[in-house]
Amino acid sequence: NNEQKALFIIFGGTGDLAKRKLYPSLFRLYQKGYLQNKFAVIGTARREWSDEHYRNVVKESIKDLYLSEKVADDFVSHFYYQAHHVSDVEHYKTLQKLADELDKKYALCGNRLFYLAMSPRFFGEISRYLKTENIVTDHGYNRLIIEKPFGRDLASAQILNKEIEKYFPEESVFRIDHYLGKEMIQNISAIRFGNNIFSALWNNRYIDNIQITLSEALGVEERAGYYETAGALRDMVQNHILQIVALLTMNAPISFNDVDIRREKISALKALKVYSTPEEINENFVRGQYAGLGDMKGYREEKDTAEDSNIETFVAGKLYVDNMNFSDVPIYIRTGKRMAVKTTRIDIVFKQVPTNIFKDSGMQANMLTINVDPQEGLNLRINAKEVKPGFHTESINLSHLHDIETKENIPEAYEKLLLDALLGDATNFTHWEEVNYSWRFVDAIRHVWDLEPADFPNYLPGTMGPKCSDELLAKDGNHWEFNP
Ligand code: NAD
């Protein structure tokens, strides 16, 4: 019996994230038996809603998932709504009463998960009231799940963390990075540590370079207001990309548990070479902003953006993890909006054989590709004999794609992360020290970029970014392996 007992309190229960991700994920956990009778959800937000209205909203959000009305109705009967304003202490008092009532009614053993699906500026205040108004219990667990972004630079992240840590110890804070919930990102560890052929070669003696691409085909859409204060470096590099870098370059953990894995990830991020001078930064990082084309608006023409905006919608960079196994391996990263395709993929490019006895000029380096999105699978490029008279080599691909049925059954990132939080497994959540080292790296670049206006816009929609991104690799005699 997998049944978990817990009360979820979702702050921001009327929001986009709650409706699109959290309710469907909770329902899937219900269908799989992780949630049965002993759970309840309190949704809070500013609007005055009745429980009945809230239950209808939740039911609507899972309408593609249920086959039976009765199952859906049973599920939503566990949902309660509480109008709430973040800084109104009375609201926390009513919340506390309701929470205790539901705890009794459903026999929840004092277990609570507080999900902050709201603007980060409220995180500190909510954590404080949860503690001072006794909404945290003393006879079960109390876990705080928080959404990104965690700060907008190191200084603000530190302030936020100090505030939260007064009320919630680090081991009870679950910082969401939904990339860590993706199947193929979790697969990195299985590939690295479950295969002797890869674990033996996973170092600077055999790897030539690593390439990470997180490209989006869409523009900023309705998020321009937020994006103007963020940019691609903060939005994608500080969290998702550096998390992937850590998983790719960390040393083998002693065992596969959250404490050991996060210890190694922290070490990898600590070993990240921080660029400090403007020269170093300009040598190793480039930025871009998309222009308009036809009826597609350029970034500066989007609603809520400045007409001379200096915000980057594209970043490419070369970074180094200076630990024993990875020093001297360039790790190229790129991410951007309005690019040719939407994709997330990792290419591990191995060194060529020490000497090419075949005298074939076109022999390619071995490459392991981890396809994260939208395809999910692996590809290993190797050299083999071409099936022809004479003796020539050719590159062939050993390829595995999750089939459609497997893919359909892959739990959604949020479902996996919510289950992990229920089970108290923090492996796929970011530890404060990871956030700390990531901001330290990103801040140095941000600082220089904020002072120097860029020559924007500099790339067309439907391309893989500005020319300077290709030049960054060409300087080293390399090229982006993924070139759609
Ligand atoms: P949203 O704007 O759709 O919802 C915000 C919620 O906060 C609403 O329920 C609103 O009623 C409530 N709220 C706002 N001010 C309040 C106040 N003063 N008192 C009480 N309640 C208040 O936002 P969202 O898109 O759901 O995002 C929530 C969080 O999740 C943010 O931190 C965001 O960065 C993060 N996030 C969202 C997504 C997504 O897909 N939407 C993805 C990743 C991260």
Image (cartoon, rainbow, N blue to C red):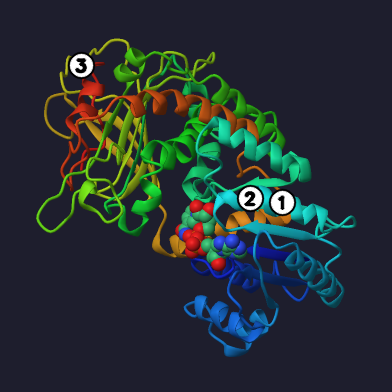
Q: Residue at x 34, y 25 (%)?
A: 451
Name the residue that disc number 3 marks: 358
Which element carries disc 2, helix, strand or loop? helix
Mark 2, mark 3: which one is toward the viewer? 2
Which element carries disc 1, helix, strand or loop? helix
Q: Residue at x 67, y 59 (%)?
A: 87
Quadrant of the image containing the C terminus:
top left
Q: Nearer the viewer, residue 461 or 192?
A: 461
Name the residue that disc number 2 marks: 123
Residue type at numbered disc 2 = Phe
CA distance separating discs 2 and 3: 62 Å
Expressed as whole percent of the image width and height from the top left, the position of residue 357 reads: 24, 12
Disc sitting over residue 144 in the figure:
none
- Residue 409 visible in the current orientation: no
Query: Quick check: 467 above or below 279?
Result: below
CA distance separating discs 3 and 1: 65 Å
Query: Quick check: 104 above or below 118?
Result: below
Binning the other alpha carbons within 10 Å of mark 2 as few (below 14), some (14 to 19) or many (20 upward) gives many
Give the image quarter of residue 105.
Answer: bottom right
Residue type at numbered disc 3 = Phe
Mark 3, mark 1: which one is toward the viewer? 1
CA distance separating discs 2 and 1: 6 Å
Name the residue that disc number 1 marks: 127
* Circles 2 and 1: CB atoms closer than 8 Å: yes
Query: Quick check: 442 above or below 408?
Result: above
Disc with the residue nearer the chain's start (2 vs 3)? 2
